[in-house]
Image (cartoon, rainbow, N blue to C red):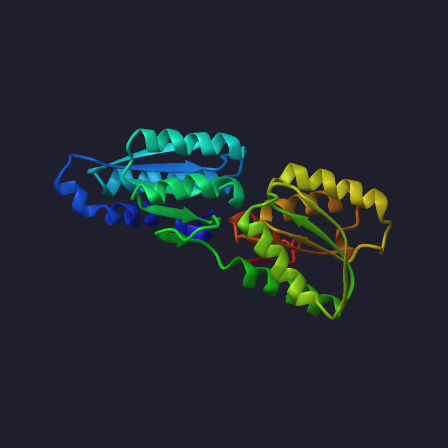
Amino acid sequence: MDKRSFLKGAIVGGAALLMANTALAQDKIVIGFSQGTMNHPWRVAMVEGNQKYAEENLPNVELIVTDGQNSSEKQVTDVETLLARGIDVLMISPLTSDALTPVVLDAMDAGIPVVTMDRKVNVPVTVHVGAENRPIGESAGEFISEKLGGKGAVIEIQGTAGASATVDRHDGFMDAIKGSDLEVVASQHADYLRENALKFMEDQLQRFGPGEIHAVYAHNDEMALGAVQALEAADRLDEVVVVGIDGQNSAFEAIKEGRLDASFV
């Protein structure tokens, strides 16, 4: 996952800088890191990269990490617990925007700097670090349109419902194919997970016969690789353009092998 290293260490350092003056008055700067889920290698890399950076570079920082376990309700409770512990900075990668906005607003109202990562909430925060997801979706749409000559049937495999990245990657893609003869014939949220995308793609291959699917647009590489796995098992990969997002190393290897057409970052 090192292709997206902007979130793998520098964030916790920046969060510590937000509270640099506090170090004069206390022994430790306490940073709470609320991760939405740890069921994806990218999420694990975010946590482990920041933990390693803090251990090696920030002796005056205590980093507390929580796992929302892919539940917005659990993540809200996690943040409330962190606030009750008296953290100095909140780092959060919100599972969904709407559900996490109120508790992030509570932190901001309490004067606690907030750093959102990868996904956003619906209020301005101190710092956001993440991808430009809508332009990424547009680029993916333009690529597929060019590969297919502006016409064909597309399967869209979306990420987590309600996540800002999901919304932006969908909207950008739809903007790019507007006015073309490309049609999204099936779409489903698969929570950015390979196994969910694999099952959805297997179902679509039963629904649509050979030659009836021309492209798969997946909101991340894990789901794109799940689609590739299903297409390979059905011996239909050669007839479908498959595109992912994230630029993870396994995706680049699949591109080199001719199994995946592109990954966008």
- Going 60% across and 60% down the picture, which residue do you hit? 137
Does 195 sit left or right of 69 as displayed? right
Instruction: Residue at the far front: name it.
Output: 109
- Going 37% across and 33% down the picture, which residue do you hit? 65
Vertically, is 141 above or below 260?
below
> Which quarter of the figure has residue 24?
top left
> Which quarter of the figure has residue 204?
top right
Does 212 sit left or right of 249 as displayed? right
| Residue 202 % position (x, y) | 77, 41
Q: Is residue 207 visible?
A: yes
Q: How many marks?
A: 0
Q: Nearer the viewer, residue 69 or 245?
A: 69
Vertically, is 83 above or below 143?
above
| Residue 223 % position (x, y) | 63, 45
| Residue 255 % position (x, y) | 61, 55
Q: Nearer the viewer, residue 12 or 251?
A: 12
- Going 56% across and 60% down the picture, which residue do you hit? 134
- Going 34% across and 36% down the picture, which residue do you hit? 32
Q: Is residue 96 visible?
A: no
| Residue 186 % position (x, y) | 76, 50
Instruction: Residue at the far right: name it.
Output: 209
